[in-house]
Amino acid sequence: MSPDERRRILGSDCIAHIHALVEVAPEPPPDVVEALRRIFTNPAGETPGAARPSTVTSA
C-alpha cells in the first residue's frame, strides 16, 4: 500500500495521531529488538535442508 493510499483510507488527522503516538513511545528493550530482528530477517523460521534422495526403490 502506498502512502497516498494510506492517507486516503485513514485521513490526515489519523496519520498525525499515529505519528504523535509513535513519537512519545519508549524504545523497546534490547531483547525485543533482537527477537524482532530474527523474525524479520527469517520470517519463515528455519527452512528445511535439501531433500535427501529416497532409499526406497520402486518395484
Image (tube, rainbow, N blue to C red):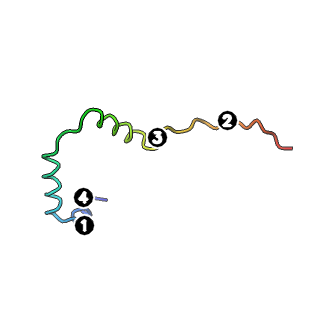
* Marks 4 and 2, how far apart at CA: 46 Å
Q: Nearer the viewer, mark 3 or mark 2?
A: 3
| Residue tagged 3 | 45
Circle nearer the N terminus (4, 2): 4
Q: Residues within 10 Å of mark 3 (few under 14, many from 20)?
A: few
Foreground of the two, 32 or 17: 32
Rendered residue at 37%/42% (across/down): 40
Residue 28 on image: x %, y %: 23, 38
Q: Disc 2 marks which amino acid?
A: Arg
* Marks 1 and 2, how far apart at CA: 49 Å
Vertical side of 34 occupied by 10: above or below: below
Circle nearer the N terminus (3, 1): 1
Q: Which structural element holds mark 2?
A: loop
25 displayed left or right of 57: left
Circle nearer the N terminus (1, 2): 1
Say which quadrant the C terminus sits in.
top right
| Residue tagged 1 | 9
Q: Residues within 10 Å of mark 1 (few under 14, many from 20)?
A: few
* Marks 3 and 1, how far apart at CA: 33 Å
| Residue tagged 4 | 3
Q: Are marks 4 and 3 in contact (CB under 8 Å)?
A: no
